[in-house]
């Protein structure tokens, strides 16, 4: 999607984390390592399954994203685009979540990093992929991942594909607020597992935001984003498809094993994204359908 040049994105809560060479401090070390390896293999995130581990110390530096105040800057620079997406998502969910029965609060941060970063879930590397960490309520993204969406996973790429990733992780924050993440953590995998349903719901939430993004306005009443184009929609759907379990398994193992799924198939991820887009966040109850309808 394209930002309106004069949209005010200064309210987006985004930081840039410096290189971190320390190790994670706190409990749950082995579990965190396993989650990070799983995330590296599967692609997009950790789904917050490290909840309960102690917050970690970060020996790197944190700095605010500066010179990112307008939509024009968001269109020109990926860090500013992340700030613009954060500003829009924040406004969207502040009004979209209360009708679903919960009070909204912002994530602590959208942290952009390079190489590695200390997190409330352990030390993340660039190989981890984007993820949401419940203990510190922060989304972590190495923006180099956006290049991998095309070079490694075969996505079309494009700004909306990048913002789909942010919106998906923001969906995990919504699940954390509502308690869905905690209730769904049963350690099971498979096409109908809670792990898959959590991920598909986050895709659905991302679709709901995309549909409303051109009507979501800054404090001056200027829409953050212009109306989506057909090509941009295809870019977002391409990103959702690229990180489907079946596609990743086929590429890495040469075969598809639904019993090992934790994120859902390419078709499911695209389908639930469009459910959110067409019907809104209230339609994103991925825990209601039986396995054959998921």
Image: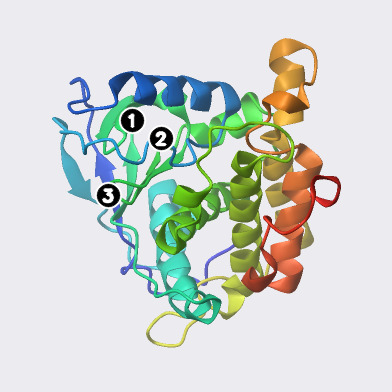
**Number of other residues with Cα within 10 Å of mark 3, as a class: few under 14, some 14 to 19, many 20 or more:** many
What whole-number distance in Å separates the C-alpha atoms at marks 3 and 2?
A: 12 Å
Which quarter shows the N terminus? Answer: bottom right
Q: Nearer the viewer, residue 68 or 19?
A: 19
Q: Is residue 87 above or below residue 119?
A: below
Q: How is the image coloured?
A: rainbow
Q: Earlier in the sequence, mark 3 or mark 1?
A: 3
* Quarter of the rendering containing residue 154: top right
Task: Report if residue 108 is visible in the image.
Answer: yes
- Mark linked to residue 15: 3
Question: Do the residues under discs 1 and 2 have CB atoms within 8 angstroms?
Answer: yes
Q: Is residue 72 above or below residue 26?
A: below
- State left or right for residue 123 relative to residue 265: left
Residue beneath disc 2: 142
SS at badge 1 = loop
Q: Nearer the viewer, residue 102 or 263?
A: 102
Residue 81 location (% of width, % of height): 45, 55
Residue 26 location (% of width, % of height): 19, 28
Residue at the image point whose x is 45% and y is 40% from the top: 131
- Mark linked to residue 114: 1
- State left or right for residue 7 relative to residue 193: left
Q: Nearer the viewer, residue 241 or 12?
A: 241
Residue at the image point whose x is 27% and y is 43% from the top: 16
């Amino acid at each position: 999607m394209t930002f309106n040049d004069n949209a005010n994105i200064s309210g987006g809560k985004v930081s840039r984390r410096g290189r971190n060479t320390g190790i994670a401090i706190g409990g749950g070390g082995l579990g965190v390592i396993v989650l990070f390896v799983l995330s590296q293999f599967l692609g997009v995130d950790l789904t917050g399954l490290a909840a309960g581990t102690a917050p970690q110390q970060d020996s790197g530096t944190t700095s605010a994203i500066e010179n990112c105040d307008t939509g024009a800057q968001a269109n020109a620079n990926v860090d500013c685009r992340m700030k613009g997406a954060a500003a829009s998502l924040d406004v969207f969910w502040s009004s979209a979540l209360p009708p679903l029965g919960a009070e909204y609060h912002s994530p602590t941060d959208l942290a952009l990093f390079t190489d590695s970063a200390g997190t409330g879930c352990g030390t993340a590397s660039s190989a981890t992929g984007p993820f949401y960490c419940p203990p510190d309520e922060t989304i972590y993204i190495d923006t180099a991942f956006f290049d991998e969406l095309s070079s490694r996973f075969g996505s079309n790429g494009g700004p909306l594909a990048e913002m789909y990733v942010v919106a998906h992780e923001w969906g995990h924050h919504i699940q954390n607020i509502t308690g869905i993440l905690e209730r769904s953590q049963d350690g099971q995998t498979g096409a109908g597992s809670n792990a898959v349903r959590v991920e598909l719901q986050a895709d659905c939430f991302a679709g709901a935001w995309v549909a409303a993004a051109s009507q979501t306005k800054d404090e001056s009443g200027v829409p953050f984003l212009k109306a989506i184009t057909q090509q941009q929609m295809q870019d977002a759907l391409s990103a959702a498809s690229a990180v489907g379990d079946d596609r990743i398994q086929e590429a890495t193992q040469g075969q598809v094993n639904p019993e090992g799924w934790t994120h859902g198939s390419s078709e499911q991820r695209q389908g639930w994204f469009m459910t959110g887009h067409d019907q809104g966040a209230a339609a994103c109850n991925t825990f209601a359908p039986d396995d054959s309808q998921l």
